[in-house]
Image: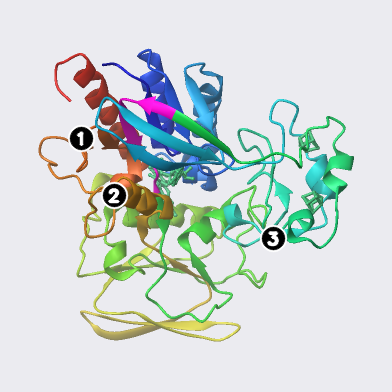
Amino acid sequence: MAGDILVIGAGVAGMKASLMLASAGRKVFLVEKSSMIGGRVIRCEDIFPAMECATCMVSPMQQEVLRTGLIQVIANGHVVSVDGPRGDFSVRLAQRASSVDPQACIGCAECWGACPVEADNEFEEGLSRRKAISVPCAGALPNVPWIDRGVCLRWTGERDCSLCSEACVFAAIDYGDSDREILIKVSEIVLATGYDTGSSALETGGSAAVFSAPEFERYYASNGPTSGELVRKDGARPGSAAILVHAGGIGSHSPINTMYCLKFLHYLHEKLPEIRPLVLLDDSYCPDIVSDVHHFLWEGTGAEIILHSGPVRWEGSEGCARLFWKNAEGDRERDIDLLILGTPMLPSEGTREMIRLLGMESDVKGFALNPDPLLSSVGTSISGIFTAGCAGGPMSIAASVTSASAAVGRILSYNTGTAG
Ligand SMILES: Cc1cc2nc3c(=O)[nH]c(=O)nc-3n(C[C@H](O)[C@H](O)[C@H](O)COP(=O)(O)OP(=O)(O)OC[C@H]3O[C@@H](n4cnc5c(N)ncnc54)[C@H](O)[C@@H]3O)c2cc1C
Ligand code: SF4
Ligand code: SF4
């Protein structure tokens, strides 16, 4: 039976799958745990391989998702339970109270301007602060704030604050809003819950010179915490830079890690052209760095590419720090005052949660296991559930979109009786 579809996660993969399913006439429930759609791509300024503007690529897709009648976006939502077989899944969803009426809100920002409470901004990797009522970033879609009841004064019991409500001339704030339960029946499920980045194996002691990969993306971004100025966390302009590509040890051993690290060479070259960056790659994982794509990424950036063997060490001080490594020529060291870590892409907390809740099997890294990769690139251990994007493993945007198309192909062909 050609039933409705549940897509879990509204990054590029989930959005692409939803749009394709809707254009084939299928009703889609797109459940997203955060208050906005778009996923992690919108934290990037530019995206390889063509170094296009990420927002320019994602924004038309976000807008199309929001205006497609057959796609019901359930933001601030999550899956509570799934029962039944393929073709007849009974799903219980929960939607967290946002305390803001999306029909009345016009996204004018007056409410968060009035709010006295600050918390770490998760979208900015904790590098800047947000208010208790906020949107994750400028230009978020939907552009509707939500109240974080974990820090809002009304819910922490500190005082009966109503400053945001007083600031809102559209009467959109609703303190009485409560969590909702939504029960749906779907025939198939697309798991598009993406990735998070893990930590580095290198001890750097919280040095102002060191950035994880997602932090560096935000520092470079024109809408990031320094409005795109590439400085260290103490505000100093660096005079040297290194990228440790496989900073997460074996967890960083994936082609996508190498690709995004080489993209950073363009960021450095554009904003700090006087620097000749050092790129350290683990020789136990030898990616084909002379491939066309890799060459395109590092060509013209003036980078020095070195293969290291064994662990890299970092001895830091407030000002400059020293990087130690070993290669074919012996022990090496260099003073470095900006170090970027190629942190590994791991299954997101949401991916791990869903794998547990759906009773699916996972692979060695914890992503959804594809038991038969020769037959299909998007299958899982449960009939009727397919992966799209990084829920199935670290991959690029192009590969995420391709896998979303493959998942949709499996669903539509099953229902026309040809495959699936
Ligand atoms: C530093 C860095 C730079 C990168 N740069 C590039 C680049 O330049 N070019 C490129 O091609 N690729 C790049 N990538 C890879 C790119 O980010 C991914 O290919 C892409 O984001 C994958 O999209 P996705 O939809 O699979 O996952 P995500 O973008 O992670 O989206 C997943 C969505 O699911 C939601 N979600 C998670 N769990 C749940 C749940 N349980 N319930 C509901 N919703 C949930 C999340 O909130 C999120 O919105 C980079 C990666 C890193 C780490
Ligand atoms: S809730 Fe009100 S004040 Fe806040 S963004 Fe929406 S319309 Fe503006
Ligand atoms: S009630 Fe007060 S503390 Fe809570 S979000 Fe509104 S302004 Fe901020």
Counting from the top left corner in percent of width and height, residue 282 is at: 26, 69
Q: Residue at x 52, y 29 (%)?
A: 73
| Residue named by callout 3 | 119
Is residue 111 shown in magenta? no
Which residues make up the magenta segment? Answer: 184-194
Placement of the C terminus among the 4 image quadrants: top left
- Whether the residues at callouts 2 and 1 have beta carbons within 8 Å, the answer is no
Q: Quadrant of residue 193?
A: top left
Image vertical order of residue 314 relative to residue 188, above or below: below
Secondary structure of the residue carrying tag 3 is strand
Q: Quadrant of residue 142?
A: top right
Describe residue 132's horizontal placement relative to residue 232 as left or right: right
Q: Which residue is mark 2?
A: 393
Residue 189 % position (x, y): 33, 32
Label 2: few (<14), some (14–19) or many (≥20) C-alpha neighbours in 10 Å: many
Q: Is residue 63 above or below residue 385?
A: above
Q: Nearer the viewer, residue 185 or 329?
A: 185
Q: Earlier in the sequence, mark 1 or mark 3?
A: 3
Distance (Cα) linking label 1 and label 3: 42 Å
Rendered position, 378 above or below 201 = above
Say which of marks 1 and 3 sits in front. Answer: 1
Q: Earlier in the sequence, mark 3 or mark 2?
A: 3
Q: Amino acid at mark 1?
A: Ser
In the rendered structure, find residue 383 and report the number of the disc placed on it: 1
The image shows residue 309 at horizontal and vertical percentages of: 24, 77
Instruction: Give the class, few, some or many, for how many residues have Cα within 10 Å of label 3's Cα (few <14, many ≥20).
Output: some
Residue at mark 2 to residue at mark 1: CA–CA distance: 19 Å
From where the camera sits, is residue 110 visible?
yes
Distance, label 3 to label 2, CA atoms, is 31 Å
Q: Secondary structure at mark 1?
A: loop
Contact check, label 1 and label 3, Cβ < 8 Å: no
Q: Mark 3 belongs to which amino acid?
A: Ala
